[in-house]
Amino acid sequence: GAVVSQHPSWVICKSGTSVKIECRSLDFQATTMFWYRQFPKQSLMLMATSNEGSKATYEQGVEKDKFLINHASLTLSTLTVTSAHPEDSSFYICSARDSPRVATEAFFGQGTRLTVV
Amino acid sequence: GENVEQHPSTLSVQEGDSAVIKCTYSDSASNYFPWYKQELGKGPQLIIDIRSNVGEKKDQRIAVTLNKTAKHFSLHITETQPEDSAVYFCAASRGTGFQKLVFGTGTRLLVSP
């Protein structure tokens, strides 16, 4: 099946700094990618839908200025957590689908565990 | 918007037993229902999915059933093995690849040897 690669798999940063997470579709073009956040023992909560060449669509309650999303190519979307604080510590996961027209399998990255100290 | 409920939150079975996880959804326009398995520290992996034009789908020890009228779908795992232990999520979405998946709350399955 298709592969979505996420990098880094884990990162520790100091409070107040910014962290960038990359999500790549390795063998297909993804016009749309999705970013999720998952707290321990909880479900995946959609943060935003990343659209290639246009602005991301954020879910209600997600600060777009804090979680910057860039989808500059058909194979790469990035999520930047700006001015990170300990409450931003979480597991961030991206996903992509390889067909825009049909609801097909969503391929997930391996996730990035962010710890803000 | 779509709301997906999932039960039970935890499920403990003995090796060889069957396990059933149930989900209900609210949006009658949803027509794609995948099930994901997530192991600790990893991203979700698709194990089976079903579309609204099908009532049941089976893949070896795993099966999914869908009742569109009642808006619920279930995951059935037979002959469970310890390696089946993980968190399982159901999800639902509408018809195109641009549409987001809405996830259930997850079920922690523990299969004891």
Image: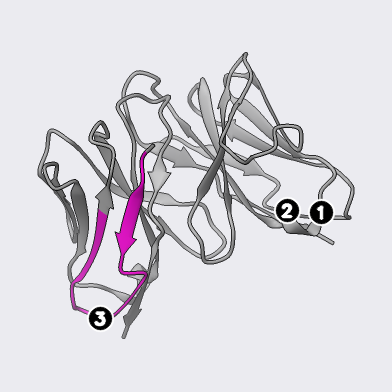
Choose between A1 and B86: the one closer to the eye.
B86
Do marks 2 and 1 share a chain? yes
Q: CA distance from mark 2 to mark 3?
A: 38 Å
Q: Magenta residues?
A: B2-23
Q: In the rendered image of this protein, does residue B44 appear above or below residue A66?
A: below
Colour pattern of the rendering:
one colour
Residue at the (50%, 51%) spot, across then down? A44
In the picture of the structure, the residue carrying the numbered disc 3 is: B15
Q: Chain of mark 1?
A: A
Residue B47 horizontal/vertical position (percent): 31, 51
Q: In the drawing, what numbered circle is on residue A88?
A: 2
Mark 3 — on which chain does it sit? B
Kindly check if marks 2 and 1 are in contact, taking CB atoms under 8 A apart as contact.
yes
- The amino acid on which the numbered mark 2 sits, given as a three-letter code, is Asp
Q: Verify CB contact (< 8 Å) between mark 3 and mark 1.
A: no
Left or right for A61, reference A85: left
Q: Nearer the viewer, residue A71 or A25?
A: A71
Q: Are marks 2 and 3 on the same chain?
A: no
Q: Considering the numbered disc 2 on the image, is that residue within a helix, a strand or a loop?
A: helix
Outermost residue toward the top? A53
Q: Considering the numbered disc 3 on the image, is that residue within a helix, a strand or a loop?
A: loop
Residue A59 — which label? none
Residue B19 in picture, x, y percent from top left: 22, 70
Q: Quadrant of the C terminus of chain B?
A: bottom left
Q: In 3D space, how far apart are the residues under numbered discs 3 and 1 (Cα atoms)?
A: 43 Å
Horizontal side, residue B24 vs residue B57: left or right = right
The verdict on a common chain for dots 3 and 1 is no
Amino acid type, mark 3: Glu
| Separation (CA) of disc 2 from disc 1 | 5 Å
Near mark 3 (Cα within 10 A), the count class, few <14, some 14-19 or many ≥20, is some
Q: Secondary structure at mark 1?
A: loop
